[in-house]
Amino acid sequence: MHVQDAGRGTRRIGPYTVVTRLDIGIPAHTPVPEHRYIARSVDGDRTVHLSRPLATMDPQRFMAEAGSSRYLLGPWVLPAVELAAPGHEVWCARPYVPALPLPIALAVYGGPLPERTVRSLAVALAETLAVIHGQNLTHAGLCPSAVLLAADGPRLTCFGAVRAATQDGDVRQGVPGLDAGSLPPEQAAGGQPRPLGDVYALGATLAYAATGYTMPERDELPPELRSLVARCLSRDPAHRPQLSEIIGELAGGPVQPDVPAGFGIASRADALLGPGWLPARVVAAIAHQSASVLAAEVEMPAQGHPSSLPAGTPFPPAVPHQSY
């Protein structure tokens, strides 16, 4: 990933100066639920992933979902840690982790990712969703561009993108920023996001990682993933597998179904995300991004009035998203 120095005409968002866009090089046909940047703080000490809503998105819904994401648990999520203050330009910041969006990783690699990478990604994302569902939440934003690949494992972002894009009851098919191939049919029709919708989106994301398409033909999928992904993509939510089934099938051995991964049991993903889980070409691109961001010189603005709320600052409470 090439990082463009902000230089003259630097874009400033809240207390941050934009270093580069995160999604430079993402295929034009791949929807991204939000505008995403890599940015640096005024004092130059902090680098963050910074997101802003699309022009078609309701800013208050975007901020509500960003606020809720602060409380997400699990090692493979990237929750917001800072929010724009009321009355200022809307944005949220997440800790910077050198990482590539999944579509860019495929472009760097030159095609679908290896089976080991997809299997490791599947277990890590399934465990992450299990933790989120254990918090009585639904992610409602999983799609290929919502997944960032870092050297030590994936990071799941874009929490609540479906809810932020439009309210329940409105048809979501064709809404800007939402990936039609990852959008569960019941949510596309306006239904409330529920946990089995996340399972559908997981199947579509794994299909993309393995083939380059969210809805490939069955025989395009690797044999090891064919049956599982096909079940995830069932139009009937009742026919989709439980996350514990996905983890058990891909990581080997049964998983206790009533205990979400991350709550008192060892992560199966840890054993899969060791050296070699990512292709060397992707690892090199991540390292290049990290070095380029570190070396980028950006013009720092003068100190101004506060325009952000740090992680510990109360924000207008978001309405809890019930899973069931």
Image: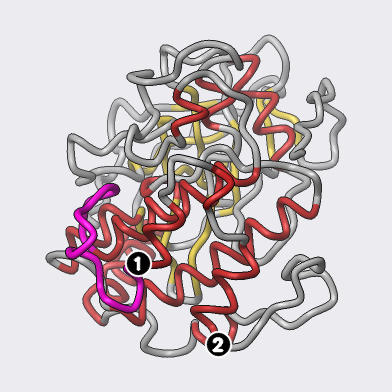
- Which secondary structure lies at badge 2? loop
Q: Judging from the image, what secondary structure is the residue with disc 1 in?
A: helix
Image coordinates of residue 3 in percent, x first then y, are 27, 51
Residue span colored magenta = 211-226
On the rendered image, what quadrant is the N terminus found in?
Answer: bottom left
Q: In this view, does 88 lie above or below 108?
A: above
- On screen, residue 52 versus residue 217, left or right, reads right
Q: How far across and down, in percent of the image, does residue 305 sit?
A: 69, 20
Magenta stretch: residue 221 in it?
A: yes
Question: Marks 2/1: CA distance?
Answer: 37 Å
Question: Pointer 2 and pointer 1: residues touching (CB < 8 Å)?
Answer: no
Seen in the image, is 135 located left or right of residue 116? Answer: right
Look at mark 2 in the image and give the residue it sits on.
252
Could you say which disc has been placed on residue 291 in the image?
Answer: 1
Residue displayed at 60% across by 46% down: 196
Percent x, y of residue 38? 43, 45
